[in-house]
């Protein structure tokens, strides 16, 4: 089958995109598979200036998942553009994930990245639970979300803008509608769920920051529910993620309405996972007799209650 | 491709069952001393997320050998593997030790950190002037690999079960490092307090030293930023790709 996914301003060979923060700057995985085979690559969240992130320990394993409080450690946009981006294969669309502490700073960052020919789209991270300023505070208030979204859309030089939503809200569809109304080209969800792990022997939290973001198979049912709800609430395309590790998982997200998916923690389970998923998804779609994504996407039978 | 599916050849609990010797084959690559692998057995399923990092104790026709201590849910599952079981392996990973044949080299191992020096014993002529000092808590018989290594490298073991033993071991570390002098080289792998003490002694006596950090790792490939160490210049670098072995002068020790 033809696995191509057509999104506004962005065409993917297939629906598989490594998720921001779990695939480094892409280059880390070049020895584990052919980067050109991926639908796109979403790189580690970038800020205007380099960030050193949170203190250690900043990761903890939990049943069927993990907690992280990396705190958006990154090399900064300049180093990324000069030392990382040129080494990524030109055939694969690169999605830059943005983090900033104010709408003005978001706009500045979007301007720098929007001007870069090699960047195919911008993903606005208003949903990181692990930073004190910015991050999720923009993702939990519809008005703040609209201000940031408008600022990024205005500065993005016509590049598609994906707004990445936080699950740590009462009604994610309200946030989705707010982002859509502010001009977002697409939405992506979910970011991590705030969680905690403690050690009864040391009587200390397992993360230096106390709490962190939960990801991995443990969050998939929550993610699926939210993607399903958001796909029904908005008219713009949705990229789904949260706990995807298998081809079945990918098709589940597409069935509830996602146009493409991002795969995060699965790349830690084994570094070649996104590459093998590309083939497995195609094979499974063919086995199920799916001829084109549009005849399957969003075709979940409605429940009556 | 650097991710391979290997098959368990043998899982051998030692005289102390908490120390297990695991052999996987066939291995398509050749590692350097100090490098490590990530292991993720098929029986981890989705319940356990990460692979687990282990030093490469041996790597030859017989396969890849790692020797580990059972301390939590991952190593418990590894200890329960059976011959024929499938294990996903990525590696060899990280930067290993950097040594020169003519340098008098002192290996300092604490507990299961001993496994990090196994590849040196494979070819003792690589470092003809090497010596090993092994600090341990379990009885020495719990570490069959110590006896394997001691046949090839001049070795001495010291057990610590009391505060006085720990003090005696610290004094011996200090004496040996001082005696080695700036022309020598210290390589250390063991618990963090030991790494810290050894690094301080190396810096104090002007002796070149390298330590292997055992930070908790999520991915092993530099992507998750969960394993970072702080360098002397204040930068946070991934232990899995910039290490696990670092020059003692390259890190902050406070
Ligand atoms: C480069 C490297 C090489 C290593 N080589 C060896 C080796 O050759 N033999 C060996 O026995 N062990 C080695 N280790 C340590 C080994 O990886 C851990 O003991 C193992 O991952 C623990 O897994 P678990 O699931 O049993 O523990 P978990 O259930 O995850 O944790 C149980 C306890 O162990 C602690 N712990 C978790 N991860 C580590 C870690 N990386 N280091 C120390 N303590 C940890 C936790 O804080 C917790 O208290 C190495 C670690 C690194 C980073
Ligand atoms: C270690 C780690 C770092 C992450 N860093 C970022 C980031 O920089 N920007 C971002 O938008 N999301 C980040 N995320 C969230 C993921 O992109 C993804 O939304 C989340 O992990 C859920 O997907 P998964 O269950 O497939 O991992 C990070 C997740 C993890 C585990
Ligand atoms: S273990 Fe993931 S960056 Fe080192």
Image (cartoon, grey):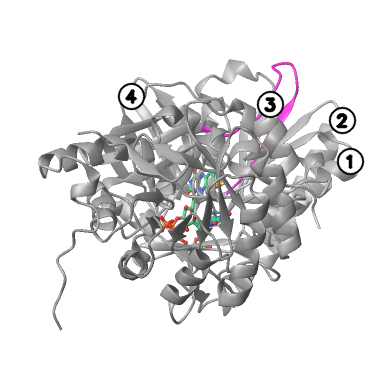
Q: Where is mark 3, residue-wise?
A: B98
> Tag 2, which secondary structure?
loop
Of A179 and A209, the residue lying toward us: A179
The span shown in magenta is B93-110
For marks 2 and 3 on the same chain, the one whose residue lies earlier in the sequence: 3
C-alpha gap between disc 1 and disc 2: 8 Å
For marks 1 and 2 on the same chain, the one whose residue lies earlier in the sequence: 2
- Check the residue under mark 4 and report the chain it is in: B
- Give percent across and percent down for residue A87: 60, 26
Q: Is residue B146 magenta?
A: no
- Check the residue under mark 1 and report the chain it is in: B
Mark 1 vs 2: CB contact within 8 A: yes
Q: Give the number of the mark in front: 3 or 4.
A: 3
Q: Where is mark 2, residue-wise?
A: B182
Q: Where is mark 1, residue-wise?
A: B205
Q: Which of the numbered marks, if any, corresponds to residue B62?
A: 4
């Amino acid at each position: 089958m033809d696995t191509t996914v057509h999104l506004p301003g962005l065409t993917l060979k297939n629906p598989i995109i490594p998720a921001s923060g779990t695939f480094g700057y892409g280059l880390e995985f070049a020895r584990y598979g052919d980067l050109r085979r991926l639908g796109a690559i979403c790189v580690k969240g970038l800020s205007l200036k380099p960030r050193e992130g949170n203190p250690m320990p900043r990761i903890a394993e939990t049943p069927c998942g993990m907690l992280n409080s990396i705190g958006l450690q990154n090399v900064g946009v300049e180093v990324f553009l000069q030392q990382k981006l040129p080494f990524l294969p030109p055939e694969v669309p690169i999605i830059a994930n943005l983090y900033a502490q104010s709408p003005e700073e978001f706009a500045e960052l979007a301007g720098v990245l929007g001007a870069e020919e090699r960047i195919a789209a911008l993903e606005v991270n208003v949903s990181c639970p692990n930073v004190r300023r910015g991050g999720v505070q923009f993702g939990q208030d519809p008005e703040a979300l609209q201000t940031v979204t408008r600022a990024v859309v205005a500065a993005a030089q016509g590049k598609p803008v994906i707004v990445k939503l936080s699950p740590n809200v009462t009604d994610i569809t309200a946030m989705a509608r707010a982002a859509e109304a502010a001009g977002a080209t697409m939405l992506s969800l979910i970011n991590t769920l705030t969680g905690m792990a403690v050690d009864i022997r040391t009587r200390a939290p397992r993360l230096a920051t106390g709490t962190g973001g939960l990801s991995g198979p443990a969050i998939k049912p929550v993610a699926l529910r939210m993607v399903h709800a958001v796909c029904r609430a908005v008219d713009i395309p949705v990229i789904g993620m949260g706990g995807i590790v298998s081809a079945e998982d990918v098709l589940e997200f597409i069935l509830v309405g996602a146009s493409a998916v991002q795969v995060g923690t699965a790349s830690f389970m084994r570094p070649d996972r996104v590459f093998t998923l590309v083939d497995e998804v195609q094979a499974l779609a063919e086995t199920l007799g799916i001829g084109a994504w549009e005849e399957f996407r969003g075709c979940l039978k409605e429940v009556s209650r | 491709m650097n991710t391979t599916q290997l098959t368990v050849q043998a899982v051998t609990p030692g005289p102390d069952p908490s120390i297990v010797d695991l052999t996987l084959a066939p291995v398509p690559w050749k590692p350097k001393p100090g490098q490590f692998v990530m292991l993720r057995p098929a029986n981890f399923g989705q319940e356990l997320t990460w692979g687990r990092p282990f030093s490469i104790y041996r790597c030859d026709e017989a396969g890849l050998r790692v020797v580990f201590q059972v301390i939590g849910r991952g190593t418990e599952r590894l200890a329960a593997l059976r011959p024929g079981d499938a294990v996903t392996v990525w590696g060899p990973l990280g930067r290993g030790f950097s040594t020169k044949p003519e340098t008098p080299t002192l290996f300092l191992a604490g507990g299961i950190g001993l496994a990090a020096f196994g590849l040196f014993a494979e070819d003792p002529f690589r470092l003809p002037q090497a010596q090993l000092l092994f600090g341990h808590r379990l009885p020495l018989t719990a570490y069959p690999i110590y006896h394997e290594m001691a046949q090839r490298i001049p070795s001495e073991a010291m057990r610590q079960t009391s505060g006085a033993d720990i003090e005696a071991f610290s004094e011996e570390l200090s004496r040996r490092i001082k005696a080695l002098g700036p022309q020598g080289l210290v390589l250390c792998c063991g618990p963090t307090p030991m790494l810290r003490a050894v690094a301080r002694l190396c810096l104090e006596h002007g002796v070149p030293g390298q330590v292997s950090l055992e930070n908790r790792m999520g991915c092993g490939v530099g992507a998750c930023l969960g394993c970072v160490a702080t360098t002397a210049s204040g930068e946070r670098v991934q232990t899995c790709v910039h290490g696990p072995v670092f020059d003692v002068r390259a890190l902050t020790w406070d």
